[in-house]
Amino acid sequence: MHAQLSAVPPPQLAASHELRFESLFHPGRGVSVPCDASGHVDMDHLTERLRNAYLGARAMVGREYACPRVKPTF
């Protein structure tokens, strides 16, 4: 998984933060998913593609991706 993925949730579900998994080997690449300020992701509102990328990134922390960080969205 080397794609730069992010989601734009519908306006009524707009997240105030994103959970970002940075690639360990490809600077600037990673996976970002909408979350709350605590880093909780509502998987029911992710697209299938983004949900799969999120689950893959979670499984590859320490091997392909750094530990995720919560960042505010602007």
Image (tube, rainbow, N blue to C red):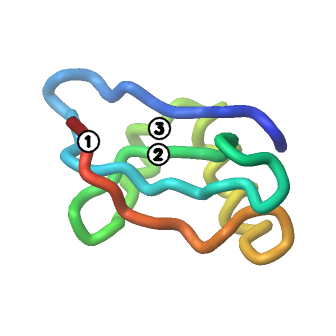
Q: Earlier in the sequence, mark 3 or mark 2?
A: 2
Q: Which mark is residue 73?
A: 1
Quadrant containing the N terminus in the rendered view: top right
Residue located 80% across and 47% down the image: 26
Residue located 77% across and 77% down the image: 62
Question: Where does the image place residue 41, in percent across and percent down from the top left?
Answer: 39, 57
**In the displayed structure, would residue 51 be above or below residue 23?**
above
CA distance separating discs 3 and 2 = 8 Å
**Helix, strand or loop at mark 3:** loop
**Helix, strand or loop at mark 1:** loop
Question: Where does the image place residue 27, in percent across and percent down from the top left?
Answer: 72, 47
User: In front: mark 3 or mark 1?
Assistant: 1
The residue nearer to you, when weighing 14 against 21, is: 21
CA distance separating discs 3 and 1 = 17 Å
| Residue 59 image-quadrant placement | bottom right
Kind of residue indicated by mark 1: Thr
Q: Which mark is residue 13?
A: none
Residue located 79% across and 67% down the image: 60
Q: Are marks 1 and 2 in contact (CB under 8 Å)?
A: no
**In the displayed structure, would residue 18 be above or below residue 39?**
above
Quadrant containing the C terminus in the rendered view: top left
Q: Earlier in the sequence, mark 3 or mark 1?
A: 3
**Helix, strand or loop at mark 2:** strand
Question: Where does the image place residue 14, in percent across and percent down from the top left?
Answer: 21, 34
Kind of residue indicated by mark 3: Leu
Q: Are marks 3 and 2 in contact (CB under 8 Å)?
A: yes
Left or right of residue 25: residue 27: left
For label 3, the residue is 46
Residue farthest along the left direction in this orientation:
12
For label 2, the residue is 33
User: In front: mark 1 or mark 2?
Assistant: 1
